[in-house]
Structures are given as C-alpha cells and as structure tokens.
C-alpha cells in the first residue's frame, strides 16, 4: 500500500475532489444530452453539421504549433498501464506511447492506482520490472518515446472513489492524479502533460475538458497551454463537429485521431433503430468502405486547415510466430493500411505491438519526407453529411456471427480477470472491438437480419451458437481453466447485451459492476472518499 499512499496523498485527493465538484455537474448534463440525442436518432433524426457553429467552420483560424516533442508523431504505440508494457512501449522505437487507462485496461482498483504508480516512475526515469518467470530485468533505454495518457471517458464512474458520497468521474480521476504527480516533472525536462481524450460526442464535451484544463493549470501553477490533448474522433456525432472540437480546446489542442473501431460501434449504436442501417460482418467493414473513407479524409482536411496533426488508426495485428506465411500476410495488411493513411495525408499512425513499429515507420518514412504533412491542405476533399452516413454493404454470415460470439465472450472473460488488452486470433482486441461484436449481434437480432443462407437470424440460432462456442472453449481449455476463466459470467453478460430490448450504452458499464463484485468477493471492497 506504500506506493498507493504515495499516489493518493492528501493534496492529490483534494485536487481530484476539486475537479469533481467543479465539473461533475457539467459531465452529468452532457451525459443527459447524449440520451436526448439518442432518442432523436431512434426517431429518425441524424447528426449534421451544426448551423449554429457555421461561423467557426468558415473562419480562418489555427491551433497553436505543437510542442517540440509532438512535432513528429509518425508512429504511435498504445497499450495498458502495466509496468512491463510501459517499459517496452517507451523503448519500442515509436515516437509516442499512449498509456491507456481506457479501452485496453480493466479498471480494477489495483490496475488503476498501480498504473499511476508506473507512470510516475516512468516520468521520473526510475521504472524497472523484474520478470519472476524469466528473471529478466526491464528498464528504460537511452531514447524513449514521448508519453501521452488516455483517461477513461466521461461516461465511466470511478466506483472505488467517492466525492460527496458519489463516485468521481473516472475521466477526472485518471487525468487529475496523473497531472498532479507528473506535470511539473514533464515540463522541467522539456515535455509536457499530453493526453488523448476518448468517446467525445460533441464540441460541448471538448469545452468541458478545456475548462478542466484551464482550472488545473491555474491551481497547479502551470503555464497556460501546458496541457495538450488529441481528441479521438471515435463517435459518429463527433465527426460532424471536428472544427468545433479543435476550436473549443484552443491552446490545448494537439490534433485529432481516427478511432476507427469505436467509430464503427458508434455508427451501429446511433442507428440502432434503423432497419436500413444493418451492417455486414465486421471483417467487411474496412477503411475502404465509403463512410469510413469520408470520415478519415474529412479529419485530415479539417486538421490540416487548422494546423493540427491528423492521426491515423490502429493496426491491431500482432506477430504470428508459428506460421511464417500467415505472418507475412498479416504484415502486408498492415503495410497496405499504413500506405493508405500516409498517402491520404495522415501525419502518423497507431500500432498495438512493438514488432509493427519498424514496418509503420518504413512506410511513413518512404512517403512523408518531413516531420508531418500538415501543409497538405486536401482542398480536393468535399465530404457531405450523406457521405458520413453511407451504410456499408456486404453479407452477414454464420462465420461472422461465430466470430463475434468468440471474440466478445473471450474478451469479457479476460476483462473480468483483470486484463483489458487481449490477443485473440492474431489480433490485439480491446473494449472497442468487443463493443462491435455485441452491438452487431444485437442489431442483427433486433432487425432479423437476413444471413447469407437467406434466412433471418433467430434468437434460437444465436443461443445455439453461443452454447456451441462455450462447449468448444471448455473442451479446449479443460473444465478447471474454463471455470476459473469466468466464461460462464462472460457468456451470460454477452447474451444479455445481445438480447436486451434496448442496446446498452456501453458494455463496460455492466462489466464494471461485475468486476467490482468480483473484487469485493476476493477482498474487502475499496470505496475511499475524498476530503
């Protein structure tokens, strides 16, 4: 508990409490507005470029130039905040490491607080890890990536931490603790506190973050604009407000990112009531689909017009060590994806595994001869509202259903075991892809989507396939590992999420409740209060 106490000091707790009291009411209101907008979408309304902010879109303005260590972001690696991952990612040769408290991290209390300990030690340069299995010591090399941090989204509470009797917003808990302990040290070495902001649905949510940044800088005595944030455009409504999001963050803006997996999930969720918007198999919803091409190109055009970085999306492939031919095919997919991004005009890209850093760098080095491509204005791009809403065409297959069940249940089981980033079928899956799996099955069942055999998907077929998947998993793992792996709980949660009358807002909300119950059964519950 010593390291925990060093993070949860009286002053740090007070800082998080002040942030919570100042901005939790605004977050509550913005979450209410999300529900209002979803009700409108359910009635047939659609997002649009906002008439009220047309002047911002038309005006000629730019965000400030990036700090020196964020000028070149051609390869960024992402991963959870466990100690070994942080060291390997910082040493990977990537330009930036995004340490993730969100979709690749299961929010157990130990994961959250120890993640803060690990980042504090990384910033100080003292982080080390001794692997008990191999005896190997991991420590930082001479040259490390620039650190960015992704806090959890506005929708998630920190159930282990109460302020005035209510859970603090997880976003402010993650952000506040990291900023309090590390901002001055980062600035002293010529860097700064840099963040990725997830799940925003409107410029009003960016405004709330900006207000939190301004207050934090004032309270901690940091120069105005010290905090920089890149916003993930990973919800469908946010794609219609990119200019406004950059504008709201003002001097704190560090560009936008194509969060492709959550964007697909959001597209399904927002159009959940429309039988004309039923998507094909996940494997067919690639970046070549018109609605995703439009979104990526609009992001590049918007960012470059404003002098900001336009970051590409995640390559989720991981090395396939025992099959050279399959590994080569996977690497070629990564190469093609990164070639599309750099030739479109992206200023950098994401990878999930250190082994992909050299490949991504090779592609960007060959086609991006400066530190970025912000000078490419893409005046040729003209994206209309209907382009962003173009429903992808394709087929729905039994194999696609089985894949969704397989990945969804296995991911939830791993998450309940404390792991938020899981290798499955040679891809690194996180909460965003699990969201697609369960939302897609829900959508197919809700609208009785016709499968490639000509028959609509029935509840009986889904349940039979779910049971068959559990039998296969039990046979593969053995009875003991199956029971210890919490596959029963995972399957029940996945089934409820796929068959509920309404599509749940986020899978991680009920999964978090279950995770806290599991923690409580193992040891006394943690529910600390701020002063």
Image (cartoon, rainbow, N blue to C red):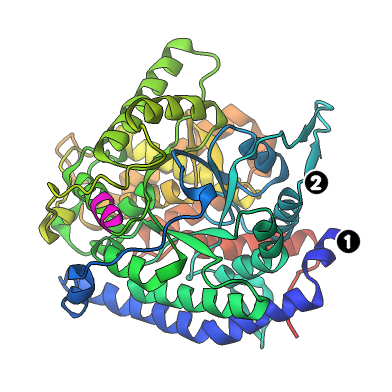
Badge 1 element: helix
Residue 28, horizontal then vertical, whole percent: 46, 82
Residue 127 relative to residue 85: left or right: right
Q: Which image quadrant: the C terminus? A: bottom right
User: Tag 2, which secondary structure?
Assistant: loop
Counting residues from the start of the chain, the first of labels 2 and 1 encountered is 1
- In the rendered image, residue 488 lying in the magenta stretch gets the answer no
Classify 50 as above or below 227. Answer: below
Crowd around label 1: few <14 · some 14–19 · many ≥20 (10 Å):
few
Q: Residue at x 46, y 66 (%)?
A: 252
Q: Residues within 10 Å of mark 2 (few under 14, many from 20)?
A: few
Q: What residue is shown at x 80% (from left), y 25% (from top)? A: 134
- Using the rendered view, name the quadrant where residue 392 is placed: top left
Q: What count of labels does the image hold?
A: 2
Q: Which is more toward the observer, 521 or 81?
A: 81
Q: Position of residue 58 (x, y in %)?
A: 17, 69
Q: Residue at x 70, y 36 (%)?
A: 480
Q: Position of residue 20 (x, y in %)?
A: 60, 81
Question: Residue 415: which disc?
Answer: none
Name the residue carrying label 2.
Answer: 126
- Residue that mark 1 sits on: 2
The secondary structure that most of the magenta stretch takes on is helix
Rendered-image quadrant of the N terminus: bottom right
In the depicted structure, whether residue 472 falls above or below residue 389: above
Q: Quadrant of residue 64?
A: bottom left
Query: Viewer-proximal residue, 386 or 242?
Result: 242
Q: Position of residue 150 (x, y in %)?
A: 54, 57
Q: Which residues are magenta?
A: 300-305
Horizontal side, residue 438 vs residue 190: left or right? left
């Amino acid at each position: 508990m010593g390291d925990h106490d060093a993070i949860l000091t009286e002053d740090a707790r007070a800082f998080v409490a002040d942030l919570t009291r100042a901005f939790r009411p605004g977050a509550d209101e913005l979450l209410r507005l999300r529900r209002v907008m979803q009700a409108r979408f359910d009635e047939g309304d659609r997002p649009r470029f906002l008439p009220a902010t047309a002047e911002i879109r038309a005006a000629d303005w730019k965000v400030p130039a990036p700090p020196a260590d964020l000028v070149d972001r051609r390869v960024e690696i992402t991963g959870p905040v466990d100690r070994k991952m942080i060291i390997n990612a910082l040493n990977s040769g990537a330009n930036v490491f995004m340490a993730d408290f969100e979709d690749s991290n299961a929010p157990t209390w130990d994961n959250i607080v120890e993640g803060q300990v690990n980042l504090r030690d990384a910033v100080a340069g003292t982080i080390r890890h001794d692997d008990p299995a191999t005896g190997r010591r991991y420590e930082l090399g001479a040259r490390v990536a620039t650190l960015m941090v992704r806090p959890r989204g506005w929708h998630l509470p920190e159930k282990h931490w109460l302020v005035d009797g209510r859970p603090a917003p997880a976003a402010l808990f993650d952000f506040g603790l990291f900023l309090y302990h590390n901002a001055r040290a980062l600035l002293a070495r010529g860097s700064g506190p840099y963040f990725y902001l997830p799940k925003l649905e409107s410029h009003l949510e960016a405004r709330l973050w900006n207000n939190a940044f301004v207050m934090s800088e004032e309270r901690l005595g940091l120069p105005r604009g010290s905090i920089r944030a890149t916003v993930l455009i990973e919800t469908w409504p946010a794609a219609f407000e990119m200019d406004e999001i950059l504008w709201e963050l003002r001097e704190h803006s560090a560009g936008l990112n194509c969060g492709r997996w959550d964007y697909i999930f959001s597209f399904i969720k927002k159009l959940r009531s429309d039988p004309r918007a039923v998507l094909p198999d996940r494997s067919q919803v690639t970046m070549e689909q018109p609605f995703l091409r439009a979104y990526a190109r609009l992001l590049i055009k918007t960012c470059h017009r404003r002098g900001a970085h336009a970051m590409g999306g995640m390559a989720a492939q991981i090395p396939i060590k025992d099959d050279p031919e399959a590994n080569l095919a996977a690497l070629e997919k990564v190469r093609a994806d990164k070639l599309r991004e750099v030739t479109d005009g992206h200023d950098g890209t994401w990878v999930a595994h250190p082994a992909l850093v050299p490949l991504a760098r090779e592609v960007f080095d060959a086609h991006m001869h400066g530190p970025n491509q912000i000078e490419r204005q893409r005046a040729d791009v003209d994206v209309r509202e209907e382009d962003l809403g173009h429903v992808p065409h394709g087929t729905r297959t039994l194999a696609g259903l089985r894949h969704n069940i397989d990945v969804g249940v296995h991911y939830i089981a791993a998450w309940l075991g404390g792991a938020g980033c899981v290798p499955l079928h040679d891809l690194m899956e996180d909460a965003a892809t699990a969201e697609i799996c369960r939302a897609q099955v829900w959508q197919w069942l809700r609208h009785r989507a016709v499968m490639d055999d000509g028959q609509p998907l029935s509840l009986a077929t889904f349940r039979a396939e779910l049971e068959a998947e559990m039998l296969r998993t039990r046979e593969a793992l053995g009875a003991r590992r199956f029971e210890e792996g919490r596959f029963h709980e995972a399957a029940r949660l996945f089934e409820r999420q796929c068959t509920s009358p309404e599509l749940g807002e986020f899978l991680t909300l009920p999964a978090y409740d279950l995770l806290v119950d599991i923690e409580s059964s193992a040891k006394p519950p943690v529910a600390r209060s701020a002063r």
